[in-house]
Amino acid sequence: MNFPCDKCGLCCRMIGGISALHDFDRGDGVCVHLHDNLCSIYDSRPLICNTSEMYDAFFKNIMTPDEFIDMNLNACRKIKKLNRENVR
């Protein structure tokens, strides 16, 4: 499964309140492993950060890969919209 990530880094800048990523929050909602807009632990990133593994672990029995990618793209669009609104 290939999620079409454009590497904007916004999802890694909005991890505050995500219990599975609590230990990765540097205190301001930004992941401690985000460096130059890239994940410094990409190959060993948490399950929640890996769309392919999340799909296999939790979603493969309830939706198709395309539906899962669409769900994640919608979340990505919402994050980008929130960011644009907060920048204004």
Image (cartoon, rainbow, N blue to C red):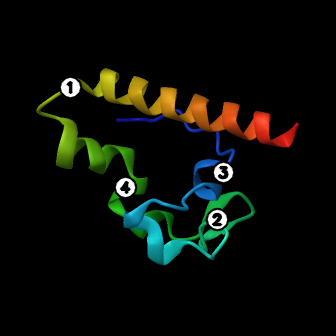
Looking at the rendered structure, the secondary structure element under dot 2 is loop
Residue at image mark 3: 9
Residue at image mark 4: 48
Marking on residue 30: 2
Q: Quadrant of residue 65?
A: top left
Crowd tier of the residue under label 3, counting other residues whose Cα lies within 10 Å: few below 14, some 14–19, many 20 or above? some
Pick out the residue farthest to the left. 61
Calculate the distance from the C-alpha at mark 2 to the C-alpha at mark 3: 10 Å
Crowd tier of the residue under label 2, counting other residues whose Cα lies within 10 Å: few below 14, some 14–19, many 20 or above? some
Q: Are marks 3 and 1 in contact (CB under 8 Å)?
A: no
Earlier residue among tags 4 and 3: 3
Calculate the distance from the C-alpha at mark 2 to the C-alpha at mark 4: 15 Å
Earlier residue among tags 1 and 2: 2
Residue at image mark 1: 63
Earlier residue among tags 2 and 3: 3
Screen quadrant of the C terminus: top right
**Label 2 is placed on what type of residue?**
Val
Q: Quadrant of residue 80?
A: top right
Calculate the distance from the C-alpha at mark 4 to the C-alpha at mark 3: 15 Å
> Considering depth in this image, is 58 or 88 the residue closer to the camera?
88
